[in-house]
Image (cartoon, rainbow, N blue to C red):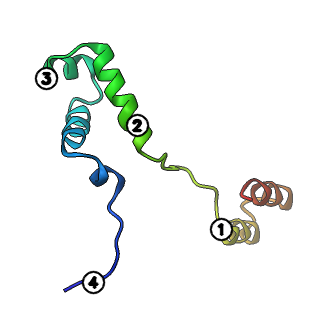
């Protein structure tokens, strides 16, 4: 048995209908025309629902700033110079 407090992933926190909608959107490869056909609703309805759902989800950073250790390691290896390292460290703060 596992005990503890755990937070559900964002998509799991959506209601069942919204989860079905997001799943359909992904399976349609983001085709709003296909979503119109599947759900039998208009383009503005699909867009409105997508906008509502997107506001419920936090943005996930897909290219996070490198950690200080990563920058220092790259500097030590000679992959970047001191000025580049300083720029990256300043940008990460």
Give me the residue at 24% from left, 16% from top: 33
Q: Position of residue 59 (x, y in %)?
A: 49, 45
Residue marked by disc 3: 38
In this figure, which residue is indicated by the disc labeled 1? Answer: 70
13 lies above or below 56: below
Where residue 39 sits: x, y (%)? 15, 23
In the picture, the quarter occupied by the N terminus is: bottom left
Mark 2 crowd level (few <14, some 14–19, many ≥20, 10 Å Cα): few
Distance between the alpha carbons at the discs numbered 3 and 4: 41 Å
Distance from the alpha carbon under mark 2 to that under mark 3: 20 Å
Q: Label 4 crowding class (10 Å Cα cut-off): few <14, some 14-19, many 20+?
A: few
Q: Earlier in the sequence, mark 3 or mark 1?
A: 3
Mark linked to residue 54: 2
- Residue 3 shows which numbered tag? 4
> How far is the residue under mark 4 from the one under mark 2?
31 Å
The foreground one among 58 and 24 is: 58
What separation in Å lies between label 3 and label 1 (alpha carbons)?
47 Å
């Amino acid at each position: 048995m596992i005990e503890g407090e755990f937070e559900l992933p964002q998509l799991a926190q959506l209601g069942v209908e919204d989860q079905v909608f997001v799943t359909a959107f992904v399976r349609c490869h983001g085709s709003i025309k296909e979503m119109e056909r599947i759900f039998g609703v208009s383009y503005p309805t699909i867009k409105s629902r997508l906008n509502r759902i997107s506001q419920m989800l936090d943005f996930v950073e897909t290219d996070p700033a490198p950690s200080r250790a990563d920058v220092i390691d790259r500097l030590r290896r000679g992959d970047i110079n001191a000025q580049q390292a300083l720029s990256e460290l300043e940008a990460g703060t």
